[in-house]
């Protein structure tokens, strides 16, 4: 549905829970009761960037760094396929160790498994994005984080808002399915700027939108900015669903960190995707964007069973398709 900026601000500012029911109805009409699972592989927490909110920022000396070799990543993708996943998401910090050649090898091997592949590895050149696409990547996630330009520049030293938008436009040009999204509850972020974020998602013609509450992370410059942003993040997500009825929206891990039933609540308020972790062992714990991350001591097998049970308990079911936004690709 079409909503003006003023109307969005009103919906975000209100305490009225009917927003969530409305978003749930819009999701059901556009997409039905299927939920898509994406197996998340966190393959490196080295990062050359220094985002003020992020636990794996370059200057965090208390972050235990690790990176998986290409064959180990491919092995995790094989296991994910064995658990029934149709998509894997390869996520890392911005780690130059993974050259285009290495990524081409990883992508082309995983492609042989008939999995859809989503990359979430940050800002690259158009040429690099084109090479990943050619090697087998189908989708790319890169959150804009905030469309408030001043706030963006303060939070992201040595980064440039316009370059981030350039990345999103290049990915669209290259025919990726493109995911973006924002953090909710950042210091000095306004309701008006969140409304601007939602309008930006529409303008950029996003295929997926991930909305996460900001969670203060120790050993970062924003460590003391503690607040519970769950309700507001849920509202931003629900309004996004009203405006973009048929896109893919995950119930984010950060939501479950702030509320014991956060993902199910999100699935009942507009979301249609969950991204369970398929990373193994201690790496789950080391990949700490924020504290209190869920499932750090669980196994990939446990998570797939756990979330499937929860999904079935609310009368929804796990899809057997790859879950592209563009239905012709499924
Ligand atoms: N709280 C919540 N989400 C965070 N991210 C990074 N740091 C935090 C934090 N402290 C999110 C960013 C990034 C995604 C991978 O993780 O939005 O895009
Ligand atoms: Fe990991 Fe529930 S999803 S234990």
Image (cartoon, rainbow, N blue to C red):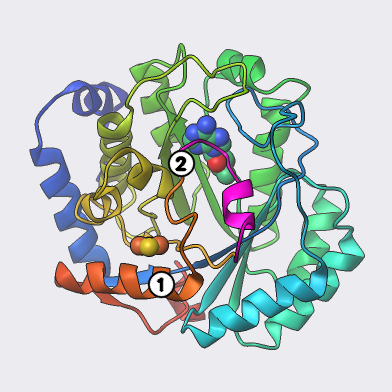
Horizontal and vertical percent for residue 312?
20, 74
Relative to 63, is 270 above or below?
A: below
Instruction: Say whether residue 283 is magenta.
Output: yes
Q: Residue at x 52, y 26 (%)?
A: 147
Spatial CA distance of label 1 from label 2 is 34 Å
Q: Is residue 32 visible?
A: no
Q: Is residue 114 left or right of residue 290?
A: right
Most foreground residue, 207 or 224: 224
Q: Which quadrant of the figure has residue 165? A: top right
Residue 178 colored in magenta in the image? no
Q: Secondary structure at mark 1?
A: helix
Q: Nearer the viewer, residue 17 or 32?
A: 17
What is the span of residues highlighted in magenta in the rendered image?
A: 280-292
Taking the spot 70% from the left edge, 88% from the top edge, the residue there is: 112
Please give the name of the residue rendered at 49% of the width and 49% of the height, measured from the top-left corner.
205
The residue mark sitting in front, 1 or 2, is 1
Q: Residue at image x 26%, y 43%?
A: 238
Magenta-drawn stretch, dominant element (helix, strand or loop): loop
Q: Secondary structure at mark 2?
A: helix
**Residue 254: x percent and y percent?**
41, 43
Location of mark 2 (residue): 201
Residue 315's place in the image compared with 10, above or below, is below
Q: Is residue 241 above or below residue 300?
A: above
Whether the residue under disc 1 has CB within 8 Å of ligand 2? yes
Q: Earlier in the sequence, mark 1 or mark 2?
A: 2
Q: Is residue 46 left or right of residue 216?
A: right
Looking at the rendering, the quadrant in which ligand 2 lies is bottom left
Pick the front one: 254 or 3 = 254
Location of mark 1 (residue): 302
């Amino acid at each position: 549905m079409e909503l003006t900026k003023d109307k969005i601000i009103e919906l975000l500012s209100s305490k009225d829970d009917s927003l969530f029911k409305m978003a749930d109805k819009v999701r059901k009409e556009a997409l039905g009761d299927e939920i898509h699972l994406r197996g998340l592989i966190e393959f490196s927490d080295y990062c050359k960037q220094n985002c003020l909110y992020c636990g794996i920022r370059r200057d965090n000396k208390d972050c235990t760094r690790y990176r998986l070799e290409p064959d180990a990543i491919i092995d995790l993708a094989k296991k994910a396929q064995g658990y029934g996943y149709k998509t894997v998401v390869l996520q890392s910090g911005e780690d130059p160790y993974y050259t285009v050649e290495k990524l081409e090898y990883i992508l082309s091997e995983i492609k042989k498994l008939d999995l859809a592949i989503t990359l979430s590895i940050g800002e690259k050149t158009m040429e690099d994005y084109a090479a990943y696409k050619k090697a087998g990547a189908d989708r790319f996630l890169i959150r804009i984080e905030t469309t408030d330009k001043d706030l963006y520049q303060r939070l992201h030293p040595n980064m440039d808002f316009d370059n981030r938008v350039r990345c999103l436009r290049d990915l669209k040009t290259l025919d990726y399915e493109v995911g973006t999204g924002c953090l909710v509850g950042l210091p000095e972020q306004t309701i008006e700027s969140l409304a601007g974020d939602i309008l930006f998602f529409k303008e950029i013609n996003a295929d997926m939108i991930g909305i996460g509450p900001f969670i203060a992370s120790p050993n970062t410059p924003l460590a003391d900015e503690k607040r519970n942003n769950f309700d507001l993040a849920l509202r931003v997500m629900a309004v996004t669903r009203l405006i973009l009825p048929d896109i893919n929206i995950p119930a984010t891990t950060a939501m479950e960190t702030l509320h014991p039933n956060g993902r199910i609540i999100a699935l009942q308020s507009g979301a249609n995707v969950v991204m369970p972790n398929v990373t193994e062992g201690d790496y789950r714990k080391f990949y700490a964007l924020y504290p209190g991350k869920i499932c750090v001591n669980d196994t990939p097998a446990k998570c797939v069973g756990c979330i499937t049970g929860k999904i079935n308990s609310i009368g929804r079911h796990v899809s057997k398709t790859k879950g592209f936004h563009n239905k012709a690709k499924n």
